Image (tube, rainbow, N blue to C red):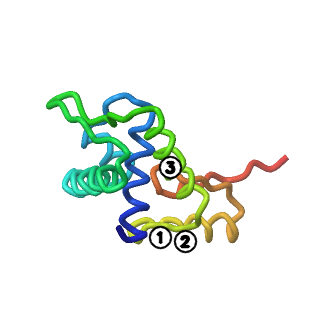
Amino acid sequence: MRTREACEAAQVLELMLPGTPVTVSQIAQKLCLTEKQARTRLQLTEDLLMENDWGQIARKPRVGSWIEAEPEQLKKIREFVHEFRQTSIIPVGQRESHVLFRLFSLKTGKDCHVQNWRVNCISRSQP
């Protein structure tokens, strides 16, 4: 699996790790994707789990998808997700927002934060 695909799978795994079912719509909304892109990422994630013998993704219509894995497998999944949180790899579709965030944070007199990879800026209050 290529680095970009592994990073995308790590994002989906991070959403699924709490153990509650996650719908395709929720994945799409949280990662700023279309539902088709979210389904593709979910399939990439399932492939990653199967390749590494880390468990599988269970699905139930109108409920969502979740990870079925043993405690040792979940530990490996958490380590994998943590590894990608520590790196500075930014998926192609999110680079523009990241660059804008950095520019607004450094060049304006405003406090900026990212919400769903969108930059929101508010004026700093003067004392």
- Name which quarter of the figure residue 18 lies in: top left
- Extreme residue in the left direction: 61
Q: Which residue is mark 2?
A: 99
Crowd band around label 2 with a 10 angstrom C-alpha radius: few (<14), some (14–19), many (20+) = few
Task: Say which of 45 and 62 sits in front.
Answer: 45
Q: Residue at x 29, y 41 (%)?
A: 56
Answer with left or right where residue 32 lies relative to residue 126. Answer: left
Task: Say which of 15 and 123 sits in front.
Answer: 15
Q: Which residue is mark 1?
A: 95
Q: Residue at x 27, y 55 (%)?
A: 47
Amino acid at the residue labelled 3: Gln
Circles 2 and 3 in contact, beta carbons < 8 Å:
no
Which of the two discs, 3 and 1, sits closer to the camera? 1
Q: Residue at x 31, y 40 (%)?
A: 26
Task: Say which of 38 and 111 sits in front.
Answer: 38
Circles 2 and 1 in contact, beta carbons < 8 Å:
yes
